[in-house]
Image: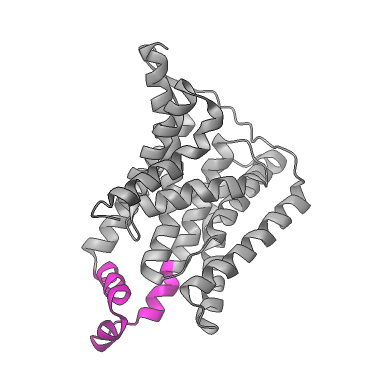
Amino acid sequence: MSASLLLQSGIGGLLLGGIYGLLAMGLSLSWGLLRLVNLSHFALAFLGAYLTYQFGAQFGWPAYASLLIIVPAFFVVGLALHTIFVRFDVSEFASMLVTFGVTVLIESLIQWIWSADFRKYETPYAQESIRLGPLFIPVLELTAFASAALLAIAAWLALHRTLLGRALRAAAHDGPIAAAFGINARQLSYGLAGLCSASAGVAGVFIALTSTLAPSQIEAWIGVVFAVVIIGGLANPLGALAAGMLIGVAEAITMATVNPAWAPLVAFSILIALLLWKPKWL
């Protein structure tokens, strides 16, 4: 295999890793700061992807117009779901079971409305790319990666450089002590839950632009992105992005040099290796 083809594969994997990181970001923050394992995050992302497809294919809306509707709507969905968690005092383990049920419901809804057929959101700029010598960088994938990087940096800065972010981290670390200093952890948790769901909407728009859609893909993405969350570290948006890039590149190189069928094994192989090695951030 030529070096240029290997490098092209690596670039493709790096850009795909941006979407992995974008998907993992909401789950990482929810799990790390709210102690809720929200598996419905993936189903919401694919619901956002199908809505983007529907708005574009039927109404001719550009992707940014879909984004302006999907993100606020998903913020409200996140608030509603978190209200249920708070009302019934759902534990960390129970949240995983509940949101898995929500995932199944959303997947069934998607299949009922759009069927199980593969669908592709065609746009005039789908094939546009930037040429750098022998390499081609797809514009849509590059935009998705840049958006993921910007959101990861913004989330990290908000958590570490603002009073609200520090209050969230303090409440997650020791709720009673944080409450003694006047931090209203419950009120902050609603805002964070809404933002996590909104980030799923952003990821969904880019999934629609860059991928072929099918309801069955939800389960396939859950495993990979779950590994990204563990590798990147909980409540660590930059770590989620870095882990997504690592797995994306590893998958792409595996498909190019070994066998495409081996790519699904890459994420968990890396996860198992890191768990055995036990680096400090895990």
The quarter of the displayed image where residue 250 is located:
top left
Q: Main secondary structure of the magenta part?
A: helix
Residue, far bottom:
180
Task: Please indicate whether residue 231 sits to the left or right of residue 208 in the image.
Answer: left
Q: Residue at x 69, y 43 (%)?
A: 59
Question: Would residue 214 be counted in the magenta stretch?
Answer: no
The quarter in which the N terminus is drawn is: top left
**Position of residue 154 in the picture relative to residue 59 (left or right):** left
Q: Position of residue 93 (x, y in %)?
A: 50, 71
Residue 197: x %, y % from top left: 50, 61
144 displayed left or right of 183: right
Q: Which region is colored magenta?
A: 163-192
- 136 left or right, relative to 66: left
Answer whether residue 143 is visible to the viewer in this image.
no
Q: What scheme was used to colour the molecule? A: one colour
Q: Position of residue 57 (x, y in %)?
A: 69, 39
Q: Residue at x 48, y 32 (%)?
A: 140
On screen, residue 211 above or below 274: above
Along the viewing direction, whichever of 137 and 266 lies nearer the viewer: 266
13 w.r.t. 106: above or below: above
Q: Nearer the viewer, residue 195 or 90?
A: 90
Q: Residue at x 58, y 41 (%)?
A: 208
Tell whether position 177 is magenta: yes
Which corner quadrant holds the C terminus?
A: bottom left
Q: Residue at left 40%, top 79%? A: 187
- Is residue 141 in view? yes
- Coordinates of residue 228 in the picture (x, y in percent): 41, 48
Up the image or down, 88 lies above or below 242; here it is below
